[in-house]
Image (cartoon, grey):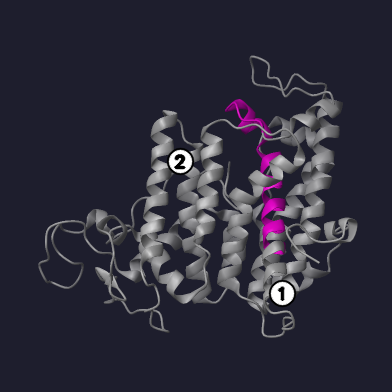
């Protein structure tokens, strides 16, 4: 599984000045000797670490996130950085029990963070001498959380934005399914997985974006529920695109995400030759890929209905990320043989063009196909 917007790159070096490279027993840049133990991390350095992760490991995601104002960009970088770390545990090799335990460690850190009264953040971004204290609003921050730049940044972001931190636990559940080698019987089962690993990120992103001042105010909670459902749908669309893009790579790692019902429908097994090539007839595989791409396009159509509810910069960020992936999906559907031979990607200039169009509002006017809401009544997860 790959977090939407991510590409596999080497794990970045620890940020300069983070807990890993500061003198033990000394709070950074304070000159005051503290009790030996994990060193606290500057909020500014913690955010800097997360933005570094985005720049080095999320080259698709970065095209959209750079369109946000700095506070939202920092917060969304933090969401991505933790999602990336959780996803890495799901993707790496190693004993299943050890990887599952590492996922549970992330869950425990999250729950410890959630117990803190995260309501004491100042309205302005802290200066270079600001430290995350050992306590926040009177609640003691566990040492392993206070020394973790991603958790430090997340704690600050959660104090500034209404982030549904429980969504990260859904991501952990999805990655645990990856580690256990889960397979999926039908499209609805696969969508459930996509909601865990990508819809969750869509809902967290919505917490950073918020609704635009001009968004429909009537219905209050109902409008928020609709926005969350559309963010969830967009996450599903991005993850389905990831699955098609990484079809061969995942299969070589003994992972099959496409539903068993769809494989039977097209007479495919996704078997591999000793050289790692698919053994199914190419025309059957092409039909299967185009079918799955059409389903993904329906989720894009529903997810893109989120954009009118967002402010201009948040809408541009969303449109850029979705536009890049939707264009990638179009290339996959147009030439399935390319994705069967290996990973397909867009040139940087194409991504830059999509992002520029999103900033000017052009991406909202592109054809999006028929909305799932139009086809099936309510949007996924919405009530009438």
- Marks 1 and 2: which is nearer the front? 1
Label ID, residue 89: 2
Judging from the image, what secondary structure is the residue with disc 2 in?
helix
Between discs 1 and 2, the one toward the N terminus: 2
Q: x%, y% of residue 47?
A: 40, 66
Residue interval drawn in magenta: 230-256
Q: Distance between the residues labelled 1 and 2?
A: 35 Å
Q: Does the segment drawn in magenta span residue 70?
A: no
Q: In this view, does 280 lie above or below 287?
A: above
- Residue 207 or residue 242, whichever sits in front: 207
Label ID, residue 41: none
How many marks do you count on the picture?
Answer: 2
Q: Is residue 360 in view?
A: no
User: Residue at the spot x=64%, y=68% of the render?
Assistant: 317
Q: x%, y% of residue 33?
A: 10, 67
- Residue 95 or residue 49, whichever sits in front: 95
Q: Mark 1 points at which residue?
A: 223
Q: In which quarter of the image is the C terminus?
A: bottom right
User: Residue at the spot x=60%, y=53% of the render?
Assistant: 5
Q: x%, y% of residue 140?
A: 26, 67
Q: Is residue 347 in view?
A: yes
Residue 118 as seen in the image, left or right of residue 357: left
Judging from the image, what secondary structure is the residue with disc 1 in?
helix
- Residue 239 or residue 14, whichever sits in front: 239
User: Residue at the spot x=30%, y=59% of the render?
Assistant: 16
Q: x%, y% of residue 89?
A: 45, 41
Residue 282 as seen in the image, left or right of residue 215: right
């Amino acid at each position: 599984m790959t977090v939407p917007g991510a590409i596999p790159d080497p794990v970045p070096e620890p940020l300069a000045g983070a807990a890993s490279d500061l003198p033990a027993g000394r709070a950074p840049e304070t000159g005051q000797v503290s009790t030996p133990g994990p060193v606290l991390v500057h909020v500014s350095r913690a955010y800097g670490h997360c933005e570094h992760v985005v720049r080095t490991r999320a080259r698709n995601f970065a095209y959209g996130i750079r369109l946000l104002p700095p506070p939202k960009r920092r917060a969304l970088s933090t969401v991505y950085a933790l999602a990336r770390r959780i996803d890495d545990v799901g993707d790496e090799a190693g004993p299943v029990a050890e990887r599952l335990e590492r996922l549970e460690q992330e869950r425990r850190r999250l729950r410890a963070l959630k117990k803190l009264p995260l309501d004491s953040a100042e309205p302005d971004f802290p200066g270079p001498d600001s430290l995350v204290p050992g306590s926040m609003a009177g609640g003691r921050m566990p040492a392993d959380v206070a020394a973790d730049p991603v958790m430090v940044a997340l704690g600050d972001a959660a104090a500034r934005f209404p982030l549904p931190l429980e969504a990260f636990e859904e991501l952990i559940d999805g990655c645990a399914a990856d580690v256990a080698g889960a397979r999926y019987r039908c499209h609805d089962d696969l969508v459930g997985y996509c909601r865990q690993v990508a819809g969750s990120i869509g809902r967290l992103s919505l917490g950073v974006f918020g609704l635009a001042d001009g968004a429909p105010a009537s219905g209050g909670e109902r409008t928020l529920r609709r926005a969350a459902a559309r963010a969830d749908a967009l996450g599903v669309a991005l993850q389905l695109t990831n699955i098609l893009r990484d079809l061969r790579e995942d299969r070589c790692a003994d992972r099959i995400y496409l539903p068993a019902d769809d494989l039977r429908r097209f007479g495919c097994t996704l078997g591999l030759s000793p050289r790692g090539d698919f053994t199914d007839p190419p025309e059957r595989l092409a039909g299967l890929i185009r079918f799955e791409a059409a389903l993904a396009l329906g989720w894009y159509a529903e997810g893109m209905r989120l954009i009118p509810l967002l402010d201009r910069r948040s809408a541009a960020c969303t449109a850029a990320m979705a536009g890049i992936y939707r264009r990638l999906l179009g290339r996959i559907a147009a030439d399935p043989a390319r994705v069967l031979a290996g990973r397909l990607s867009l040139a940087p200039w194409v991504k830059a063009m999509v992002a520029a169009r999103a900033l000017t509002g052009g991406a909202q006017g592109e054809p999006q196909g028929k909305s799932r809401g139009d086809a099936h009544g309510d949007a996924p997860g919405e009530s009438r």
